[in-house]
Image: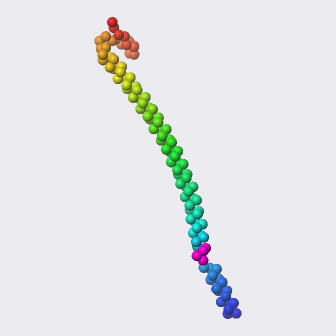
Amino acid sequence: MRRSNHNKKKQKKSIRQLRPEKLLLLAFCLSCVFYCFSKIGLNSYNITLSVEDQRLASELAEAQDEVYTLKTDISSIQDKNKMLGIVEDELTENQDNIYVINN
């Protein structure tokens, strides 16, 4: 009887102990799960950054178009003022927008 009790204790003890193979397998499974979640998270973050980059690029293009338009407006106003400066007294204004050159 003593031997059977002793054998049962050994069996229980070996069941309770984790073997290194089981620990390695558990660590490998956990690392695989962590890798999958990290990969999914980083991919979604990259997509978010890509969308934000496209939005900022479109805003930049709109701002550049507006700057170009304003530059052309300034250029035309400067040309008009140069012409008015050259003609000076020979010019009369009619209805605030129409200029009549006196002969």
Residue 51 % position (x, y): 52, 45
Give 95 or 21, whichever is nearer the viewer.
21
Residue stretch in magenta: 18-22
Relative to 102, say whether 28 is above or below: below
Give 30 or 9, whichever is nearer the viewer.
30
Residue 43 % position (x, y): 55, 52
- The residue sitting at 33% across, 17% down in the picture is 83
- The residue sitting at 64% across, 86% down in the picture is 9
Q: Name the side, left or right, on which 82 lies relative to 63.
A: left
User: Most prominent secondary structure in the magenta stretch?
Assistant: helix
Residue 75 % position (x, y): 37, 25
- The residue sitting at 60% across, 66% down in the picture is 29
Relative to 56, say whether 6 is above or below: below
- Colouring mode (rainbow / by chain / secondary structure / one colour): rainbow
Q: How many marks overall?
A: 0
Q: Name the side, left or right, on which 35 lies relative to 81.
A: right
Relative to 27, say whether 100 is above or below: above
Q: Residue furthest bottom?
A: 2
The quadrant in which residue 17 appears is bottom right
Give yes or no for residue 27 being in the magenta stretch.
no
